[in-house]
Amino acid sequence: MTIKMVWEHLSIVLISVILTVAAGVPLGVCACLNKGVRKVILSVVEILQKIHALALLGVIIVGVGAGKVTVVLGWLRY
C-alpha cells in the first residue's frame, strides 16, 4: 500500500461524507418541517434500504461504469 493509495481512499471517503451531509441535512430539515415531504422522503428511503447493497452496486455500475464515481455513489447510498 502506498501513500498515494491512502490519499486516494481518504479523498473518496471525504467526498462521500460531504455529499451525504449536503443531501441529508436539508432533507432532514424538510422532513421535520413538512408532513407531506416527510412521507415522500421516508417512502423513498425505505425503498432504498430494502434494495440489497450488491444489487444496487450492480445498477450503479451499469449506469455510470466502474470507478471512483461508483464508489462515491455506493457510499452516498448508505
Image (spheres, rainbow, N blue to C red):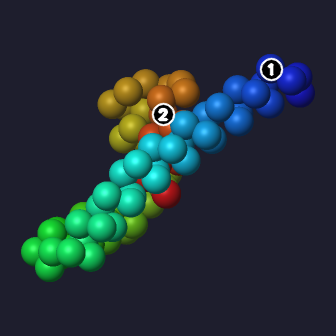
- Lower sequence index among marks 2 and 1: 1
Please say if the residues under marks 2 and 1 sit with CB atoms less than 8 Å apart: no
Q: Is residue 74 above or below residue 62?
A: below
Element at label 1 = helix
* Structural crowding at the residue carrying mark 2, measured as other residues with C-alpha within 10 Å and reported as few (<14), some (14–19) or many (≥20): some
Q: Is residue 5 above or below residue 9?
A: above
**Which amino acid, by three-letter code, is at mark 2?**
Thr
Relative depth, front residue between 14 and 52: 14
* Structural crowding at the residue carrying mark 1, measured as other residues with C-alpha within 10 Å and reported as few (<14), some (14–19) or many (≥20): few
The disc placed on residue 70 is 2
Q: Quadrant of the N terminus?
A: top right
Residue 60 appears in which quarter of the rendering?
top left
Residue in view at x 44 percent, y 60 percent: 52
Residue in view at x 80 percent, y 20 percent: 4
- Residue 16 appearing in the image: yes
Residue at mark 1? 4
Q: Is residue 10 above or below residue 47?
A: above
**Which amino acid, by three-letter code, is at mark 1?**
Lys
Element at label 2 = helix
Residue in view at x 33 percent, y 67 percent: 28
Relative depth, front residue between 17 and 72: 17
